[in-house]
Image (cartoon, grey):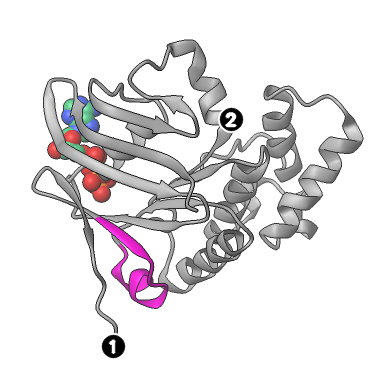
């Protein structure tokens, strides 16, 4: 049986008073890898922002990792984000501390206290993204692809029920994009659910999966043709 981790029904998404997407009906189930595609300005980021509580949902219904987006309170947002792993195009690592420092910062901010448990979690997530030997480096000493791997490791720290990746390969060259995509594919195969916004059609062709498209203020599923 499929277990939904995200469900939007007849939802409308606004940026201030501007309607960006309407009649949005979307379901993402546990274990899925789902793409969200669409031309620039069609609402992919607005859609993602609604999911992590940056834009309030004011029309329709929406639930994500057991939070009701319509009744979500400001003070629940950190708790929601703890259950989500969020990966951005521009990595958003803290440049004043090492890779390990970046990961420790998130663990401490989310209530972890036991030093041994934190070290073991850091080793675990860095291993998953193939960066275990680079925990002493500063972000500016890493390539873009390596920085994105660290951002993915950071997203995995609290065993998220859903990973939201907004253009995770947007700042990377094609070869590095494929490498980062391989990491995302691996963690999906290991059971993580991923929703990834992208405009990189080459990745879609290379790694076909369920695809939602934003176009003309709507979101609909597109069927990818084989061959
Ligand atoms: N803070 C804002 N206030 C008002 N309108 C906004 C705001 N941010 C974005 N918009 C508008 O909302 C629409 C959708 O933007 P959004 O960033 O969601 O698109 P996108 O598909 O993610 O594009 P891109 O691929 O360029 O990131 C655009 O018309 C944009 O101008």
Name the foreground residue: 26 vs 203.
26
The residue at 26%/72% (across/down) is 224
Farthest front residue in view: 1
The answer to whether residue 47 is left or right of residue 188 is left
Q: Residue furthest left?
A: 216
* Residue 208 placement (x, y as % from top left): 38, 72
Which mark is drawn over residue 227? 1
Mark 2: secondary structure: helix
Q: Position of residue 7 (x, y in %)?
A: 36, 39
Does residue 98 sit above or below 78 in this rendering?
below
Magenta residues? 200-212
Image position, residue 38 (x, y; %) = 21, 55
Circle on res. 82:
2
Q: Residue furthest right?
A: 116
Tell me how far mark 1 sits from mark 2, CA to CA.
Answer: 40 Å
Classify the position of the C terminus by image quarter. Answer: bottom left
**Could one spot residue 89 in this view of the protein?**
no
Front-most of residues 210 and 46 = 210
Rendered residue at 56%/41% (across/down): 161
């Amino acid at each position: 049986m499929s277990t939904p981790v995200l469900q939007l029904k007849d939802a409308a998404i606004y940026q201030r008073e501007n309607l960006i997407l309407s009649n949005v009906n979307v379901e993402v189930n546990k274990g899925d890898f789902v793409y969200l595609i669409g031309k620039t300005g069609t609402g992919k980021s607005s859609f993602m922002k609604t999911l992590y509580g940056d834009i309030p949902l004011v029309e329709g219904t929406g639930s994500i990792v057991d939070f009701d987006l319509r009744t979500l309170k400001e003070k629940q947002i950190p708790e929601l984000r703890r259950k989500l792993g969020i990966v951005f195009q521009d990595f958003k690592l803290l440049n004043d501390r090492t890779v390990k420092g970046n990961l420790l910062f998130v663990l401490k901010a989310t209530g972890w206290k036991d030093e041994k448990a934190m070290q073991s979690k850091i080793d675990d997530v860095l291993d998953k993204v193939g960066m275990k030997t680079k925990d002493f480096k500063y972000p500016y000493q890493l390539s873009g692809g390596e920085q994105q791997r660290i951002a993915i490791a950071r997203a995995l720290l609290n065993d998220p029920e859903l990973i939201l990746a907004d253009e995770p390969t947007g700042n990377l060259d094609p070869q590095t994009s494929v490498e980062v995509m391989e990491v995302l594919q691996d963690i999906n195969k290991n059971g993580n659910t991923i929703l990834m916004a992208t405009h990189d059609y080459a990745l879609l062709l290379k790694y076909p999966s369920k695809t939602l498209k934003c176009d003309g203020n709507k979101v609909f599923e597109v069927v990818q043709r084989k061959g």
